[in-house]
Image (spheres, rainbow, N blue to C red):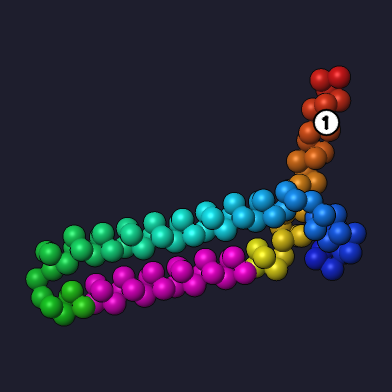
Amino acid sequence: MSVSDPEARERTEADPRVESMLRRDLACAVIFTCAMWLVLVFVYVNVVTVAPTVALRVVLGVSMITLGAFNTASIIALVRRYRHERDAIYGEDLRNLDLARAARKQVGA
């Protein structure tokens, strides 16, 4: 299913499950990013106490900030892509969920 497919876009835009799935994924991205920064700061604070020189502490700090910045940027890019391509990303999932639900009903009936 492509994003330019008008039928698919209409079907997923009308489906409130798309927004629900998008909100859940965005919340997970924010939680993951916050947790990542907490872990990075925790590790830095604990490692810097045993670093023998100031230069090494600076290198550790710059490394922590660089790693966190690149990971945060990648999460932001992921979120933007999810918003832009929501029809392609969630439409296929919803279609498969609906097909599986219909198949279970047929087996149970």
Q: Is residue 108 above or below residue 38?
A: above
- Front residue (pair 73, 28): 28
Q: Secondary structure at mark 1?
A: helix
Q: x%, y% of residue 66?
A: 36, 75
Q: Residue at x 72, y 65 (%)?
A: 85
**Residue placed farthest to the left in the image?**
52
Quadrant (top left, top right, bottom left, bottom right) of the N terminus: bottom right
Q: x%, y% of residue 57?
A: 18, 74
Give the quarter of the image for residue 13: bottom right
Q: Is residue 84 magenta?
A: no
Q: Residue at x 80, y 46 (%)?
A: 95
Q: Is residue 72 above or below residue 101?
A: below
Q: Residue at x 78, y 35 (%)?
A: 100
Left or right of 36, for residue 1: right
To which residue does mark 1 refer? 103
* Residues in magenta, as a range: 59-80
Give the quarter of the image for residue 107: top right
